[in-house]
């Protein structure tokens, strides 16, 4: 193409750039910025990576524990194998930077699709973008961690999108609506990625129950739907196929037992903070309850009655979220289209229509350019050079004991039975695979009694007896999380030799 023609194309593109398009781009871009600027914490990420490495190297999905010395050989059901292989593959291709970029793209796609659903339901682009950025995202940030759950999120929102379109008039004709066939196809993928696959089934079941109840009530009242609705057998067939698709995993029906056992595990429900109910004593809990309060106000003063199926979905997932903080991401996703649609109804029907201001093309292009520049500066290959604060500029969270583990590996008299912070166990599994761990974030693998011992040892309470019980000969301590144990070891230099220390971690070996 000649230079003059290229200039005309660029000029036409600039002239056609509207403020609505800038809003839309900004909504998705600011979603992507958050994971781009968030370092990877050391907890779940590394053991998933290490398991992916084992699967690729051996060609088999491990069924017993090979990472710890306290539970070596014990059965362990590894449900998220496909996500682990994918994460390890990305790391092999481009290291941690590529994983961070993939995280941003997955999150941006998921919330971009949710934004599209909000626009369809409300008819208001700017309202949808504003609510997404000011309401939805702050209530969801806490769950944006690089782990298998991330890859389940877009599947959940695809389910929500397809089911919403099916019941709100997009499906036509008597035959099975083709997009419903996406549900079992994605179900076969989801069941190998993360245990949240059961939530896809919950979306189908709740939608079916809500639609069946609404049609029954309309029939009792002697009225009918104003617009033709698709037959319920469509959804029943899609649900049955999705249930069958769940069997497309290496363990077959065992995967359902895995989910049941995880949800009933006393170790998980008692000891993992994200499995505890949200509380206003936690900043994320405050944001969650503010979101709920805002939702109540919107529903109370909206000028239209909410869709009953939307309310059933929101109520069911609110119940889940009130039971465990990690479930708020699903509730917020389900509630967002409902609340945006109701918020759009606040405008009186008889209000005069006004043209939507679309700005100046040149200024719109400048705004888009600034957003693009921010994205470029946040790329994981660029931001480490910008001298940003460590909690933003680093790719790996500074609390990760990188230097301490390097020292440990280089130690010719390295301890054989190391006690360490739980999150450090995950990083040890990856960075020092020859070093068996005491425990790691696979909470359900270790008995509750062991985790109670962990709490006592970390606090420096009865540490001598408990460390002797596990025949521990080394300590890799988180200075902040295990301050009690650190003080206990420092007070016994004749028994414990300090071999490494920095702001984050301390490494001791028994003399």
Image (tube, helix red, strand yellow):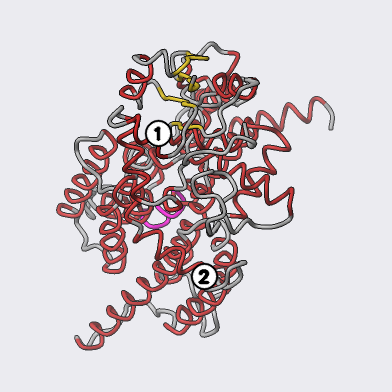
Magenta-span inclusion, residue 116: yes
Q: Main secondary structure of the magenta part?
A: helix
Residue 266 x %, y %: 32, 55
Q: Earlier in the sequence, mark 2 or mark 1?
A: 2
Q: Residue at x 41, y 42 (%)?
A: 143
Q: Residue at x 24, y 62 (%)?
A: 306
- Relative to 440, does residue 371 appear above or below in the rendering? above
Q: How many marks?
A: 2
Q: On the image, numbered disc 1 is attached to which residue?
A: 467
Magenta-span inclusion, residue 486: no
- Residue 84 visible from this viewpoint: yes
Q: In what element is the residue under mark 2?
A: helix
Residue 309 x %, y %: 30, 68
Magenta region: which residues?
115-123
Question: In this view of the protein, which residue sits in the foreground, 257 or 99?
Answer: 257
Q: On the image, numbered disc 2 is attached to which residue?
A: 254
Q: Residue at x 19, y 38 (%)?
A: 280
Residue 310 x %, y %: 31, 63
């Amino acid at each position: 193409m000649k230079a003059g023609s290229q200039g005309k194309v660029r000029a036409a593109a600039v002239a056609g750039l509207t403020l609505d398009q800038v809003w839309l781009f900004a909504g998705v871009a600011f979603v992507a910025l958050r994971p781009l600027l968030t370092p990877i914490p050391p907890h779940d990420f590394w053991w998933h990576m290490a398991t992916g490495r084992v699967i690729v190297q051996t060609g088999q999905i491990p069924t017993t524990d090979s990472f710890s010395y306290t539970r070596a050989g014990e059965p362990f059901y590894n449900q998220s194998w496909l996500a682990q292989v994918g994460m390890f593959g990305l790391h092999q291709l481009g290291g941690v930077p590529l994983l961070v970029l993939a995280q941003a793209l997955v999150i941006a796609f998921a919330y971009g699709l949710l934004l599209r659903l909000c626009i369809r339901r409300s008819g208001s682009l700017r309202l949808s973008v504003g609510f997404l950025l000011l309401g939805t995202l702050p209530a969801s940030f806490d769950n944006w961690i690089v782990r298998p759950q991330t890859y389940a999120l877009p599947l959940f929102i695809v389910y929500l999108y397809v089911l919403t379109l099916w019941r709100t008039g997009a499906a036509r004709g008597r035959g099975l609506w083709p997009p419903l066939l996406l549900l079992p196809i994605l179900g076969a993928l989801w069941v190998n990625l993360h245990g949240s696959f059961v939530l896809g089934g919950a979306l189908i079941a709740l939608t079916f129950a809500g639609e069946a109840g609404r049609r029954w009530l309309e029939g009792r009242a002697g009225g009918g739907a104003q617009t033709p609705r698709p037959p319920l057998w469509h959804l029943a067939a899609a649900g049955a196929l999705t249930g069958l698709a769940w069997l497309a995993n290496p363990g077959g029906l065992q995967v359902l037992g895995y989910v049941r056992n995880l949800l009933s595990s006393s170790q998980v429900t008692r000891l993992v903070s994200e499995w505890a109910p949200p509380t206003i004593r936690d900043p994320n809990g405050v944001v969650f309850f503010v979101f709920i309060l805002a939702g109540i106000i919107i529903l109370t003063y909206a000028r239209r009655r909410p869709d009953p199926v939307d309310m059933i979905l929101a109520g069911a997932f609110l119940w889940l979220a009130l039971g465990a903080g990690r479930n708020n991401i699903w509730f917020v996703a389900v509630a967002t289209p409902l609340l945006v649609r109701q918020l759009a109804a606040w405008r009186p029907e008889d209000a005069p229509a006004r043209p939507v201001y679309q700005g100046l093309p040149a200024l719109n292009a400048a705004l888009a350019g600034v957003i693009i520049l921010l994205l470029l500066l946040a790329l994981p290959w660029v931001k480490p050079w910008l001298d940003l604060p460590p909690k933003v500029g680093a790719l790996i969270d500074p609390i990760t004991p990188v230097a301490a583990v390097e020292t440990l590996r280089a130690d010719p008299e390295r301890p054989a039975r190391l006690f360490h912070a739980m999150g450090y166990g995950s990083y040890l599994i990856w960075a020092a695979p020859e070093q068996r761990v005491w425990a790691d974030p696979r909470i359900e693998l270790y008995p509750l009694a062991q985790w109670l011992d962990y709490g006592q040892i970390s606090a420096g309470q009865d540490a001598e007896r408990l460390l002797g019980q596990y025949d521990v000969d080394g300590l890799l301590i988180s200075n902040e999380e295990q301050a009690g144990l650190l003080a206990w070891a420092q007070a016994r230099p004749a028994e414990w030799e300090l071999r490494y220390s920095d702001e984050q971690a301390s490494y001791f070996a028994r003399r």
